[in-house]
Amino acid sequence: MDKEPVVAEAVVRACALLKAFRQEGELLGLRDLVGRTGLSKTTAHRLAQSLVQGGLLERVNRNAYRSLLRPLGGPGFRLGFAAQAADSEFSREVSASVQRAADREQIPLVTVDNRYSPTRALRNADLLVGEGVDLVLEFQAFEQVAPIISSKFIEANIPVIAIDIPHPGATYFGANNYQAGLIGGRALGRWAKANWGGQVETVLQVELPLAGPLPQLRITGMLAGLAEVLPGVKKTPTARLDGKGIFEKSLEVGRRYLRRTRPSRTLVLAVNDPSALGVLRAFEEAGRGQLCAVMGQNAVRSAVEELRRAGTRLVGSVAYFPERYGDELIPLARAILQKKHVASAVFVRHQLVTPKNVGLIYPVETN
């Protein structure tokens, strides 16, 4: 009878540790290695030190290792991800979802942070071209630099998926802005009809001009949806604020606006949730909370929590589900690289979230 082949368990464990590195150049600490392999901390440390000695791992500092081999079992391509600033809830959700999906598919991801800066976005485009990535997921909000960024990648023959802000020559992935606006505007009109008898004295638009005309379609859509329900609103006085898409700036411009205007029943159409929440807080600080009704866009976590608050004047927010972006972006990138036909624009699903349905769409997490 033939004997069973002898298996060197230490070699098998060493292979498992090498397979833990899923992306080229990825840095992993001892805790990461333990989590991805199931090895004990002592075993993982001993094997990592042995692989450093054998020239297969590099110890970068006291707490991190880098594999000197190409990741095993990968897809054969690398993606560049130019992420938006991490101080935005929406951007953080998008980044986390892209990273999760890339990890799940074992796709190497070269990530840079555009930091909400056009200068940084241009510099990062050069960096990703220099890295020789096969496709770029570009997430930056400045319309004026989009053609320059696109030209850099086109010249390098690198396809681009533009997230939420169109870039010339890129596949667009993100919101159907006008449709999302219609959903919010109709809901706000129905609320005003039910609660104020349709008597609206002011319409306040909180905009984001730097992002260009496409996100502005959210406001255009909201105005159109509002007018469908309340035709007379077309004659209502309208004011416009630039909240820069940021809570603090929207709060500031909201305060200034309220200091110079008389109290009136006001419908607030906001380009995103930070803008909506900033202006809402300004109304509440001024003692005019009951004179406003606010519609947001994105349904980020802070807006979801506001919708749970009893008596909130945030009537709703149109969800874009950024936590699911990665689940669609990574397959889309793979399809483009495999030369499959893809649409020039891929829209995310939208859904209105209100105080009545927020618990169904985003159930409260319990331990």
Image (spheres, rainbow, N blue to C red):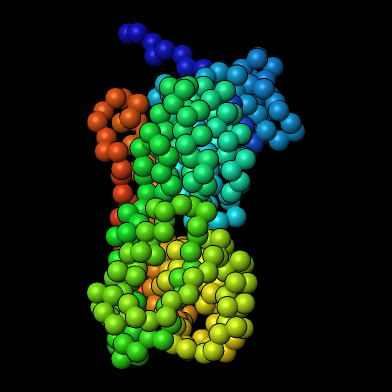
Quarter of image, res 333? top left
Q: Residue at x 48, y 75 (%)?
A: 239
- Image quadrant in which the N terminus is located: top left
How many circles with numbers are drawn on the protein? 0
Provide residue 161's location: percent of width, then percent of height.
40, 37
Front residue of 61 and 218 = 218
Direction from residue 337 to residue 261 in the image, left or right: right
Quarter of image, res 345? top left
Provide residue 335's location: percent of width, then percent of height.
31, 31
Provide residue 222's location: percent of width, then percent of height.
34, 68
Q: Tell me, yes or no, if residue 182 can be seen here.
A: yes
**Does 111 appear above or below 188?**
above
Q: Residue at x 40, y 25 (%)?
A: 75
Provide residue 83's location: percent of width, then percent of height.
53, 43
Q: Residue at x 41, y 59 (%)?
A: 216
Of all residues shown, which one is farthest toward the top? 2
